[in-house]
Amino acid sequence: MKVFVAEKYGFCPGVKNAITLAKKTLQEHEKVYSLGPIIHNEEIVNELSEEGLETTSSVDDIDKGTVLIRSHGATLKQLDQMRSRELNIVDATCVLVKRVQKIAQKLDEEGYKVVVIGDEHHPEVQAVVGSANNVVVLGGQDDLCKLSGYGKLGIICQTTQSPDYFTEMLGKIIEHGFSELKVVNTLCSETKRRQDAAVKLCKRVDIMFVLGGHHSANTRKLAELCKNHNNQTFHLQNWRELDKRLLCGIDKAGVTAGASTPDKVIDEFVAKLNEYSSQQ
Ligand code: SF4
């Protein structure tokens, strides 16, 4: 069995920055909290927790100390709460996520009904929702009814969605007819590079492995895209999750990883796949 790795995979600049900032903050401050898991990767979260990073879901749980805002960002309400509690804020929001929040505010100020295409439960989308007035989230075609009664729409997208999905949803919105649509491309180019490389690779292998946390939106999207082109696509967190029976009769295996997956997880997976193959 030959093992191929996607041309682009793993940590993106936003995640790298969040981890570096977390480590630096832990060295400089006594009590450090992260509002939600710093990234969607259990190993890194556990590693940082051992170094003292405490993860909490609400500002209400923090009386004093330092709060690290993760790459997905925080809502204006959370920021206000942190300021009113006089907490020390270290902002690791990815610049591309911040850009989406600023665009949402600007569209709102310009009089557009702000529409975000994405997953309403994802922290990045929740932060965008909290950054402007009455933002509507479209999680799929069933949500289009939420737009009735509006004329001018300002449309943006969760950074980790695929261009195909963004285009498909825009097409559906246009079918509903609105007087004015302003579309701003807020997709993350780092995510797109990983998606393009994964799709290219999955088309030429017998089996495709997408590595990353099960809660990681960008990893899930990578797996979904690969599955569209290669039915034998599997989203795994690491080598331990692999059912070795899947490797029976496989000539070519492909590997990629989401933006929050550490290199060591990918390196271990590829090394073990090669080792397994040489023993057959
Ligand atoms: S995937 Fe893109 S938007 Fe998200 S943290 Fe990484 S660089 Fe930023």
Image (cartoon, rainbow, N blue to C red):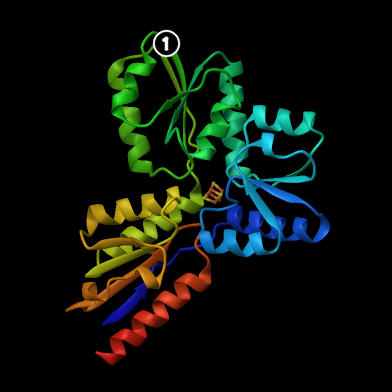
Give above or below for 223 relative to 244.
Answer: above
**Whole-percent x and y of residue 220?**
38, 51
Q: Give left or right: position of 72 versus 255.
A: right
Give above or below for 114 relative to 245.
Answer: above
Give above or below for 188 relative to 167.
Answer: below
User: Which residue is depicted at the point 34% across and 80% down?
Assistant: 273
Residue extending farthest to the top is 149
Q: Give left or right: position of 172 versus 196.
A: left
Amino acid type at circle 1 is Tyr
Between 64 and 155, the one nearer to me in the picture: 64
Badge 1 is on which residue?
Answer: 150
**Whole-percent x and y of residue 208?**
29, 66
Q: Quadrant of residue 237?
A: bottom left
**Whole-percent x and y of residue 210?**
36, 62
In terms of secondary structure, where does tag 1 sit?
Answer: loop
Residue extending farthest to the bottom is 279
Between 39 and 114, the one nearer to me in the picture: 39
Between 180 and 239, the one nearer to me in the picture: 239
Mark 1 and ligand 1: say if the CB distance to the nearest ligand atom is below 8 Å.
no
Characterize the local packing of mark 1: few (<14), some (14-19) or many (20 or more) Cα atoms within 10 angstroms. few
User: Which residue is depicted at the point 81% across and 55% down?
Assistant: 30
Q: Quadrant of the C terminus?
A: bottom left
Q: How many marks?
A: 1
Q: Quadrant of residue 57?
A: top right
Q: Quadrant of the N terminus?
A: bottom left
User: Which residue is depicted at the point 59% across and 55% down?
Assistant: 15
Q: Quadrant of residue 258?
A: bottom left
**Whole-percent x and y of residue 172?**
29, 26
Give above or below for 232 relative to 228.
Answer: below
